[in-house]
Image (cartoon, grey):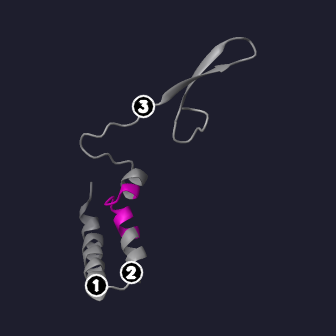
Amino acid sequence: MWGPGDLQLVLMLLKMYHDWWETGTTTQQRAIQITMDSLGLSTKGRRDLRWLLPGEAPSAPVLQIEDAPSKVRRIRAVDPATDPGVS
C-alpha cells in the first residue's frame, strides 16, 4: 500500500523510534504515534485508511425498516457503529 514517496517517512519513523528507545523520553511518543497512524501501522491508522488485514471481512450493512406515513415500508442500509438504534 505504500509508494516510493513513503520510504522517507518510514525511515524517519525508524529514526524517531530508535531515538525514543535509546533515551527513554516520552517527548517523541506522540509524533511516533501520528506517523504510525499515517502509514497504517496501527489499528487506528488502518481504520482511517480503510485497510483490512488478510482474512478480515468488511462489516456488512444492517438493513433497517422504516414506517412511512403512506404505509409504504422503506429499507435503508445503516452502519451499526454510527447508529445507536441498531443492535
| CA distance for labels 3 and 1 | 42 Å
Dominant secondary-structure state across the stretch colored magenta:
helix
Q: Residue under label 1, please give it.
A: 19
Seen at 33% across and 62% down, the residue is 39
Seen at 36% across and 73% down, the residue is 32
In magenta segment, residue 28: no
The quadrant the N terminus occupies is bottom left
Nearest to N terminus: mark 1 or mark 2: 1
The mark total stands at 3
Task: Pinpoint residue 2: horizontal percent, then vertical percent.
Answer: 26, 58
Nearest the viewer among 36 and 10 is 36
Task: Pinpoint residue 26: horizontal percent, then vertical percent.
Answer: 39, 82
Instruction: Identify whether 54 is placed above or below 11.
Output: above
Other-residue count near label 2 (Cα within 10 Å), few / some / many at <14 / 14–19 / ≥20:
few
Instruction: Identify whether 85 is placed above or below 69.
Output: below
> Residue 60, labelled with which disc?
3
Three-letter amino acid code at disc 1? Asp
Task: Pinpoint residue 55: horizontal percent, then vertical percent.
Answer: 25, 39
Asked which quadrant contains residue 11, the reply is: bottom left
Instruction: Identify whether 60 is placed above or below 32.
Output: above
Other-residue count near label 3 (Cα within 10 Å), few / some / many at <14 / 14–19 / ≥20:
few
Three-letter amino acid code at disc 3? Ala
Give the residues drawn in magenta, as a range: 34-44
Seen at 32% across and 36% down, the residue is 57
Nearest to N terminus: mark 2 or mark 3: 2
Tags 1 and 2 in contact by the CB under 8 Å rule? yes
Three-letter amino acid code at disc 2? Gln
Secondary element under disc 1, as helix, strand or loop, is helix
Locate residue 64 relative to residue 36 in the image: left or right. Answer: right
Q: Residue under label 2, please give it.
A: 28
